[in-house]
Amino acid sequence: MAWRDRRGALRAILQGSACVRPASVYDAISIRIADDLGFELGMFGGSVASLAILGDPDIALITLTELSEQMRRMARAAALPVLVDADHGYGNALNVRRTVQELEAAGAAGLTIEDTLLPQAYGAAGPQLISREEGLGKIKAALDARLDPSLVIVGRTGACAITSLDDAIARAAAYEAAGVDALFFTGVKTRDQLAAISAATKLPIVLGSPPAELADWDYLAAQRVRIAVQGHAPIAAATEAVHKTLSAIRAGAAPKQLTGLATAELMDRVTRSDLVEEREAQFLGLARE
């Protein structure tokens, strides 16, 4: 699938009537599994990128180069459209332009730019926001940098949990007026909050980790939520599996005693071994056994 087709698929989700739950993806294997299982969309979160690439918590240590190169690897591995959490754009509005350029070239279907102050300010006990004006400047820079008009640009705000619902709506309204394709809200906890957001805006909504009160997909769809991010369990599951396996090996377990391993059939499928064998026969003259 061409990059523009992937971006078209994401736009179709935003323009549809259902609430989609994306797969959390972070490398070539995870995106292929998600694609094979029929997910409509992958979400490449900043926290997951930090874990997969650096092994560090989500404290804005990852660089744009590292993020975009990982996206490039995933775009090569599978055709699943991916929405990338581009955090704060790795700097000011001019850095945001560079972020959009790099992720567009890397094959992202869309990206989010948020108004959180990152990295965390010296002496700050909790998350802070940049000003509405600076946030709007970043959004305008992101839109200006886009070369492919099918690339999805999502304006994201965490104001609901940091400042107030009214501030979140005001920021979203400004981003909407600037021309973003969708609005991403984190920290929404109640139906009343979501209803107020839906009533005050017109664009498709992306919701970050909705709590149990909001985990009704038909209700979310009716409130114009088109994507509901469900956290990043796959990398936590993978970490647990690797830890369990290495612990068993360290304790002396033989290979045949290990449990919870992928079957040979699954490994062949995710590594596309049939395609590799076909290409070996076609281009290297190697006959299948």
Image: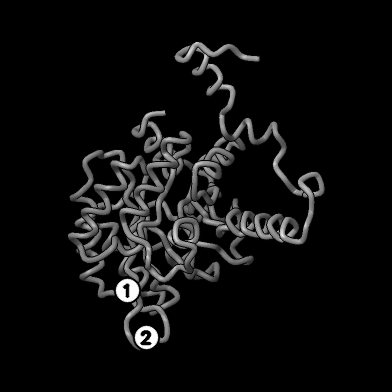
The residue carrying pointer 2 sits among few (fewer than 14), some (14 to 19) or many (20 or more) residues within 10 Å by Cα, namely few
**Can residue 202 be seen here?**
no
Percent of width and height locating residue 49: 45, 57
Instruction: Give the SS element for disc 2.
Output: loop
- Between 278 and 149, the residue placed more toward the observer is 278
For the residue marked with disc 1, what is the amino acid?
Leu
- Between 101 and 274, the residue placed more toward the observer is 274
Count every numbered label the image shows and give the total: 2
The residue carrying pointer 1 sits among few (fewer than 14), some (14 to 19) or many (20 or more) residues within 10 Å by Cα, namely some
> Mark 2 highlights which residue?
124
Percent of width and height locating residue 118: 33, 72
In the figure, is residue 211 to the left or right of 45? right
- Using the image, determine if residue 44 lies above or below residue 15: below
Report the residue at 79% width, 54% height from top: 253
**Can residue 222 be seen here?**
yes
In the figure, is residue 115 to the left or right of 271? left
The residue positioned farthest toward the front in the image shown: 252
For the residue marked with disc 2, what is the amino acid?
Ala
Percent of width and height locating residue 145: 20, 49
Report the residue at 38% width, 31% height from top: 5
In the figure, is residue 187 to the left or right of 61? right
Report the residue at 48% width, 54% height from top: 225
Measure the C-alpha gap from mark 1 to mark 2.
10 Å
Instruction: Give the SS element for disc 1.
Output: loop
Q: Are marks 1 and 2 in contact (CB under 8 Å)?
A: yes
* Mark earlier in primary sequence (1, 2): 1
> Mark 1 highlights which residue?
117
In the figure, is residue 176 to the left or right of 188? left
- Using the image, determine if residue 257 lies above or below residue 196: above
Q: Quadrant of the C terminus?
A: top right
